[in-house]
Image: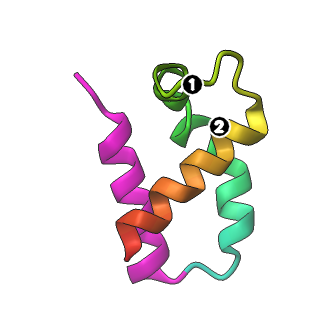
């Protein structure tokens, strides 16, 4: 079962519809779980050793693309 895209979509819905008071803190608390599947996608995209920052940046990029 692939849950990564569903988790990204759920987090986007929470941000857009629930308007949490501290979205950055929410992101910082849960970014590891939200982005845990993205290392694989970056490897496939040609990044041999993606850093944590690259993984989290990609996660934010995906969230932004969901919300637009």
Main SS of residues in magenta: helix
Secondary structure beneath dot 1 equals helix
Q: How many residues crowd mark 1 within 10 Å: few (<14), some (14–19), many (20+)?
A: many
Between the C-alphas of marks 2 and 1, the distance is: 6 Å
Residue 23 visible, this orientation:
yes
Residue 49 image-quadrant placement: top right
From the image, which quarter does the C terminus lie in? Answer: bottom left
Q: What residue is pinned by disc 1?
A: 39
Residue located 36% across and 57% down the image: 10
Q: Position of residue 2 (x, y in %)?
A: 27, 27
Q: Is residue 41 left or right of residue 10?
A: right
Residue 34 to residue 48: above or below: below
Q: How many residues crowd mark 2 within 10 Å: few (<14), some (14–19), many (20+)?
A: many
Secondary structure beneath dot 2 equals helix
Q: Along the polypeptide, which appears first: circle 2 or circle 1?
A: 1
Q: Is residue 17 left or right of residue 37?
A: left
From the image, which quarter does the N terminus lie in? Answer: top left
Label disc, if present, on residue 55 of the rendered structure: 2
Residue 62 to residue 31: above or below: below
In this view, the residue farthest toward the front is 46
Range covered by the magenta-colored residues: 1-19
Q: Looking at the image, do the residues carrying marks 2 and 1 touch, with CB atoms under 8 Å apart? A: yes
- Between 56 and 23, the one lying in front of the other is 56
Q: How many marks?
A: 2
Residue 44 falls within the magenta-colored stretch: no
Residue 53 to residue 10: above or below: above
């Amino acid at each position: 079962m692939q849950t990564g895209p569903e988790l990204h979509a759920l987090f986007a819905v929470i941000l857009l519809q629930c308007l949490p008071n501290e979205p950055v803190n929410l992101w910082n608390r849960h970014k590891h779980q939200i982005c845990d599947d993205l290392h694989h996608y970056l490897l496939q995209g040609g990044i041999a050793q993606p850093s944590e920052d690259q993984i989290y940046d990609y996660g934010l990029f995906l969230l932004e693309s969901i919300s637009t």
